[in-house]
Image (cartoon, rainbow, N blue to C red):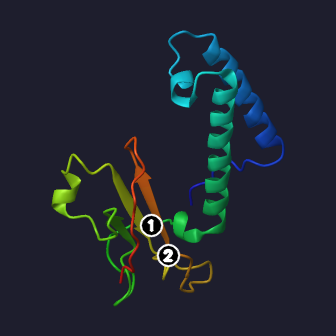
Amino acid sequence: MPPDLLPLDGPALAWARDAARELARAAAQTPDSLLPRIAGESDEDLLAFLEQLLELYAFWCHLRREHPALRQRHFFEGRPTIRGGPKDLAWLNPSGREMTGDDWYDPTLTSLGMFVSGAPLRSPGPRGEQQVDSSFAMFFNSGARAVQVTSRPLV
């Protein structure tokens, strides 16, 4: 089983915040640094941006630790794990439907979603039992503008 991601709590979080401050100072002294342009103009903006990234990373680490659906040992197959169940993984259009072949080549589509089913998981538990977890739908947007997404049941 792959190792869990670094948990960011206590001393690890304090260390990461110190590292973010050092990175902010170094970026401010480097004329070609891309970080200030991403995060804002001032050192405070950059530090706030890096701390938000750390909080997001800590949140994802916690979520992954708590949910076996997000740390499965087997590859997703894009098909149900049991007859009549939802696919173990589905790629979603922002409208909530599954992506089609044309969607993948649509240059105007700047976001997509990923549905991970936890009902049930493909891998058995430690004693061979059927595992069930929460299901997740995550949307990712590469565009500069917010995108409205719609969720629908995937059965």
SS under mark 1: loop
Name the residue nearer the viewer: 51 or 68. 51
Rendering quarter of residue 20? top right
In the image, residue 14 above or below residue 81 = above
x, y percent for residue 13: 77, 42
Residue marked by disc 2: 123
The residue under the point 31% across, 63% down is 93
The amino acid type, in three-letter code, at marker 1 is His
Considering only vertical position in the picture, is 30 above or below 36? above
Q: Is residue 113 visible?
A: yes
In the drawing, what numbered circle is on residue 74?
A: 1
**Quadrant into which the C terminus falls:** bottom left
User: Which sits earlier in the primary sequence, circle 1 or circle 2?
Assistant: 1
Q: What residue is shown at x 68% (from left), y 47% (from top)?
A: 55
Disc 1 and disc 2 in contact, CB within 8 angstroms: yes
* Image-quadrant location for residue 78: bottom left
Q: CA distance from mark 1 to mark 2?
A: 7 Å
Indicate the amino acid at tag 2: Ser
Q: Secondary structure at mark 2?
A: loop
Q: Is residue 23 left or right of residue 118?
A: right
Furthest-right residue in this view: 11
| Crowd class of label 1 (few under 14; some 14 to 19; many from 20; radius 10 Å) | few
| Residue toward you, 17 or 8 | 17
Looking at the image, the residue that sits furthest to the left is 102
Corner quadrant of residue 133 = bottom right
Picture residue at 50% right of the left edge, 65% below the top: 73
Can residue 4 be spotted in the picture?
A: no
Say above or below: 78 vs 22: below
**x then y, percent, for residue 46:** 63, 28
